[in-house]
Amino acid sequence: MVTRRKPTDKAAALPRGAEAPPADARSAQGATQQAGYAPVLNAGFQATASRVQEMHQAIAGKTFDGLLRVPGLSVPTRMVQSVHDAITQGVYAAVRHGGGAAMSLAAGAERLAADPARVPGAKEQAARSALNGVFGDSLVAAGSSLAVQMGLHAGGAPLALTAGSLGSLRPRVCVFIHGLACDEQSWRLRNEAWGDSAWAQALGADRSMNYGALLEHELGVSAIYLRYNSGLPIEANAQAFALLLERAAMAAPQVLDWQLIGHSMGGLIARRAHDVAAADGLVWPKRAPMIICLGSPHLGAPLEKIGHVANAALNVSKVTQPLGRIAGARSQGIKDLRHGLKGKAKSLAPPALRFVFATLGDESDTTMGPLIGKMLGDGLVMASSAADHDASGDVQRVEVAGLGHMGLLNHPRVYALIRRWLGAPEKG
């Protein structure tokens, strides 16, 4: 007999930025919090000034060490070094204090000018999501109100996890999960490819073409979107999402089919959340028969692997160690992409898995196209990682040639695969 854990048991152990949102939708979006951009900028300014000072001292230190070894120059060198160190410390201290004072004034002005009830616009929210992708874990640790709170959204508004709010969901729901440094708006970008497709006129001229809107129109599903802090560890986000979807399933018992569609990091979170939820005996995995992953680095992303090696190389020399500290300040979410889901425990009853991976090579070029695709993948994720040939069971893998990583978010060729997997008839 499997005992299901209560959501509150695990939620208490999650990072604050990864907790499932409260029932009140305004609180879930953080609309009552002030932006607090000035403190974040101040922290970045102070860290940068410190790293510059460390590089200055390391470079100067090598010069002075060489002069100290020259006979007859050790005494004057120490005198010059003492003066140099005193002056540079004073200069950098003045820079930090001056910059900090300016940022403090800016923070005060920001607090006076900020409207606590203001909801960030689309562009500001996109900027916050990008910031969270790079420094999201640090924002949470600092208690910054800029840290994105996990929540479900539909129609541009947050969804409260109550029967009243979710009662209009249809029996089949598609949950779209964005990737690193993105938010739910990313699924509506890059509309240019739809002009000559079979769905060019499906939604009318005044509506944005995207997978969710088309699936609602053609298949009668409900499309909802997860927003989360992509700078937090993938495991923390997966656990939080597992609990969040359980609350949604409890509030919407009429939903019999939860389809998870994740792009890049979002696919990793979808798969890991399903495994965690199934292991804990939660309800929704039994109603989630399929996960569709678009360009997800299941076996790791090469750019983060290169970043890890570069970070290690920078830390070898005292001169470049400050740059290594800057490189090492990237979020844990980014660092987790180095390994993807390798080494993670897998469910004994995995869902059907559908992997779409793009390659930059042109499919019409039978000579160079496959070679380019093999060498570059989709520009960010290699085909071998996105295809995850280690996965077993009901797995289908499809390559989409001539498309980049971000192109997977909104393209008719990808949509044709999604709708087919969801049971729609073929369309020309």
Image (tube, helix red, strand yellow):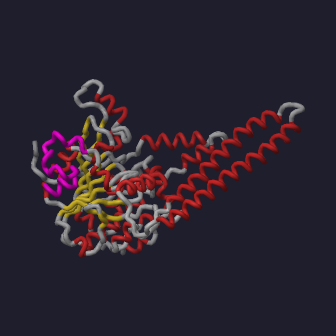
> Where residue 267 appears, x then y in whole percent?
32, 52
Q: Residue 73: name its quadrant.
A: top right
Residue 322 horizontal side relative to residue 152, left or right? right
Frontmost residue, 23 versus 379? 23
Q: Is residue 14 visible?
A: no
Magenta segment: 191-217
What residue is rendered at 32% in x and 44% in y?
Answer: 406
Name of the residue lying farthest toward the top: 367
Q: Which one is nearer the viewer's eye here, 39 or 328?
A: 39
Q: Is residue 15 magenta?
A: no
| Pick the front one: 111 or 2 | 111
- For the point 23% across and 54% down, the residue is 352
Compared with 247, 235 (above or below) is above
Residue located at (26% from left, 73% from top): 250
Relative to 290, residue 246 above or below: below
Seen in the image, is 79 located left or right of residue 390? right
Lateral position of residue 333 relative to residue 167, left or right: right
Examine the rendering and report whether any part of residue 380 can be seen: yes
410 displayed left or right of 428: right
Total marks in image: 0
Quadrant where the C terminus sits is top left
Which quadrant of the view contains residue 121? bottom left
Q: Does residue 196 belong to the magenta stretch? A: yes
- Which quadrant of the figure contains the N terminus? bottom left
Residue 376, how many percent across, how many down? 36, 34
Q: x, y (%) of residue 14?
A: 45, 67
Characterize the magenta stretch by its predominant secondary structure: loop
Percent coordinates x, y for residue 308 in the rendering: 51, 44
What residue is drawn where x is 29% and y is 48%?
Answer: 189
